[in-house]
Image (tube, rainbow, N blue to C red):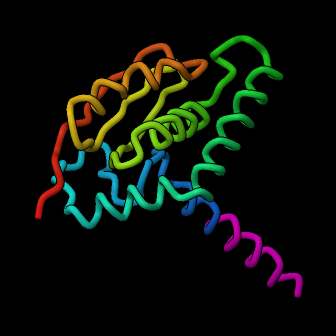
């Protein structure tokens, strides 16, 4: 049993590290990875993403997530440098998902508050919303928009 315990703990840690390896926040599982060639999604993929993001349960989750983060931020120090890159990326992702529900976006952030948004949106209006929405998040100092307009194909 003494030999089995370290093995089980090692396996659990390895599995946890592998699960956390994807350090980007996505508005949808189909969102392209940063640097990935952007291909216009099919109409079915857009519709599926839209239905999921507009469901009552998902909207409630997004609202609760945003409120919890705002409360946590208010409770912490005022220095934006105290925010982790993962927190920034996740919070920006939630904001974009709530306001651009049919976008397929990927969000990356740095400790310095630089946020990069990649992926696709349906129209120029949605594309122009990305930067101001991301800037609303406490700790975001600069937004790089690498997203493109790609109307659904098929």
- Residue lying farthest bottom? 1
Instruction: Tell me the chief SS of the magenta region.
Output: helix
Query: Which of 56/52 is in front?
Result: 56
Q: Is residue 39 above or below residue 110?
A: below
- The image quarter in which residue 79 lies: top right
- Is 17 situated left or right of 23 in this image? right
Q: Is residue 95 positioned above or below 142 on the image? A: below
Q: Is residue 122 toward the left or the right of residue 69 in the image?
A: left
Q: Residue at x 78, y 15 (%)?
A: 77
Name the residue furthest front: 56
Please give the name of the residue rendered at 64% of the width and 63% of the height, measured from the top-left corner: 16
| Extreme residue toward the left, this view | 154
Q: Where does the image place residue 63, in percent across and percent down from the top left?
A: 65, 41
Q: Position of residue 93 (x, y in %)?
A: 49, 39
Does 4 lie within the magenta span? yes
Quarter of the image for residue 17 reads: bottom right
For the residue pair 40 and 9, the one nearer the viewer reads as: 40
Q: Position of residue 66 (x, y in %)?
A: 65, 36
Would you place residue 136 above or below residue 48 in this image?
above
Write down the region rendered in magenta: 1-14
> Which percent across, then down, holds residue 30?
34, 59
Most foreground residue, 14 or 145: 145
Figure label count: 0
Q: Is residue 21 magenta?
A: no
Judge left or right: residue 107 versus residue 103. Answer: right
User: Which residue sits at x=11%, y=64%?
Assistant: 154
* Quadrant housing the N terminus: bottom right
Q: Is residue 91 above or below residue 38?
A: above
As drawn, is 39 to the left or to the right of 60?
left
Q: Residue at image x 35%, y 26%?
A: 129
């Amino acid at each position: 049993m003494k030999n089995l315990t370290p093995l089980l703990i090692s396996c659990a840690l390895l599995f946890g590290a592998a699960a956390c390896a994807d350090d980007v926040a996505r508005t949808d599982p189909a969102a392209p990875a940063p640097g990935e060639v952007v291909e216009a999604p099919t109409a079915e993929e857009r519709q599926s993403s839209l239905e999921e993001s507009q469901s009552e349960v998902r909207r409630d989750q997004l609202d609760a997530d945003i409120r919890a983060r705002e409360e946590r931020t208010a409770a912490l120090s005022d220095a934006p440098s105290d925010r982790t890159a993962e927190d920034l990326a996740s919070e920006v992702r939630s904001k974009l998902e709530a306001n651009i529900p049919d976008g397929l976006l990927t969000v990356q952030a740095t400790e310095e508050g630089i946020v990069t948004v990649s992926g696709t949106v349906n129209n120029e209006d949605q594309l122009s919303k990305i930067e101001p929405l991301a800037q609303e998040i406490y700790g975001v100092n600069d937004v790089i928009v690498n997203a493109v307009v790609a109307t659904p194909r098929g």
